[in-house]
Every structure is written in C-alpha cells, then in structure tokens.
Image (tube, rainbow, N blue to C red):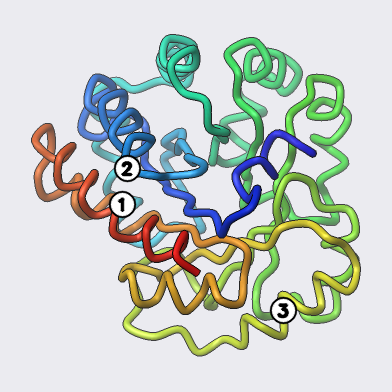
Amino acid sequence: MTKLSKAFENKKAFIAFITAGDPDLETTEKLIYEMVENGVDLIEIGIPFSDPIAEGTVIQEADIRALANGTTTEKIFDLVEKIRPNVAIPLVFMTYCNVVFGYGTEKFMQKCQQIGIDGLIIPDVPYEEKEELHPYTKKYGIELVSLVAPTSHDRITSIAKDAEGFLYIVSSLGVTGVRSEIKTDIGEIVSLAKSASDIPCAVGFGISTPEQAAAMSKTADGVIVGSAIVRIIAKYGRDSVKYVGEYVKSLADACHHQ
C-alpha cells in the first residue's frame, strides 16, 4: 500500500484543499488540525503561485492574498515540518512547475521528503512531460499524482497504468470552481481507468454540497473539494476555522456513509 492510498483504505475518501497562507500561515495551521479532526482523509496544501492556470477566481484570489502577506515556499515548508508530527493523514502539495523549478527540483523533492509530504499535484505538467520530475519524485519517495480530464479519453488508460497514489479525475472542462451540476460521465472515466489499474480514483473540480459528494463517491473512490472551502476562508478570514470544520464534516460524512 502506498502512502496516499491509505486515505482510501476501507472507505470512500474525502480530500480537502486549502491555499497555504490564506489569510495567514497561523490560520492555515489551525485549519489543517480542524479538518483532520472533522474526518478529512487527505489534505492538499496549495503553494500559492502568481499565475495558477488551472484555478478559477476563488483560488486565484486566495493565492493573491497569500502572496501579498509574504507567504513563501520556504515558510510553507517550515509550517508543514511543524504540523507533520501531529497529523497522521497523508499530505500533498498542489502547485505549479514554476514553483518547483524556481526552488530547484531536486532540492524541492528532498525538502518534501524531509518534512513528511507524501505526494505532489502539479496541474501544468502533463502526463507526457512528467519524466522531467519523475526521477526526483522517485528518488525521494514522493508520489506524483496524475490528472485526467473529460477530454483525456484516449489517454485515460495510459495515464492510469502509470499513475501513483491516486488518479485525480477532473469532473468538468475549464478551471476549478463551484458548479451547480456536473454533467461529465464520471462512471465511464472511472471504469476506463480501472480497466488499466486498480489505483483509487478521486473526483474534483466543482463539488460543493454533501449531496454532490455522496453522488460522486458512489462512482469514484474519493471526492476532492477546494473552491468551496476556500470561499468560506475568504468570507471569514481568521475566524473561518469553526465554519470550515462544520462544512468539511458534512462532506466527509457524506463520503464515508457510502
């Protein structure tokens, strides 16, 4: 069993995303503990970037707030190193290749290993280019999570065959953000992926209600929610911890009761 697949052990996984440093790193620390307390199985920690091409307005604005208050990759590493001994669930970084290359690819992976990061999600490194990172992630035991989109049709089985940790299924075309309904045939994507590999499949982009989470976790092995959580943080700032806790509990319960 891999580190990330632990999140899916004997249950449907609920995966939460937050932007590190929004509204500040102290609140990020409290939010992570609160989410763990309320049943989240894996946390994606966003390293803010000035041009996050896969993100909608909600997460773009969180990145801007985090960068404006002086959040750096180094400070986020320090934060994870501090919280890791108190957090048993898998933690992954979600960021963009500029952040990794700018820091130094090998140095970045080495640091991830040192502080206890289990995986990486980098949306702007397509499957065909992942060899640029793979030697380093492999060397330091970091799982590089692959994404498949509704348009990946012909490539889904190839991507799934090589995927590590879990397969991130992008539910809709376009950028991240809350959607009132998701029309993609997730079942078809999951069965194509499963025909190539037994890797867990988690669905993200657009999910915001317990009902959507329950529906998606009937088909997939896990559900990822980001923008809806970040929206609560944008609304309440440093006072958001309790509200995020209540919200993620409702979604985690919806997934776990499948």
Q: Quadrant of residue 49?
A: top left
Asked if labels 1 and 2 touch by Cβ distance under 8 angstroms, the answer is yes
- Residue 25: image location, x then y, percent: 28, 22
Q: Tell us which disc is closer to us: 3 or 2.
A: 2
**Image quadrant of residue 72?**
top left
Earlier-in-chain disc, 2 versus 1: 2
Q: Amino acid at mark 3?
A: Ile
What amino acid type is highlighted by mark number 2?
A: Asn
Q: Position of residue 207 (x, y in %)?
A: 40, 69
Distance between mark 2 and mark 1 Cα atoms: 7 Å
Which one is nearer the viewer's eye here, 187 or 256?
A: 256
Identified at 62% across, 44% down, the residue is 121
Q: Earlier in the sequence, mark 3 or mark 2?
A: 2
Question: Up-down: is 119 above or below 56?
Answer: above
The label number, if any, that marks residue 248 in the structure image: 1
Q: Amino acid at mark 1?
A: Val
Q: Secondary structure at mark 2?
A: loop
Q: Nearer the viewer, mark 1 or mark 3?
A: 1
Q: Which residue is mark 3?
A: 189
Tag 2 residue: 38
For the point 42% across and 46% down, the residue is 17
Q: Is residue 244 above or below residue 207?
A: above
Secondary structure of the residue carrying numbered label 1? helix
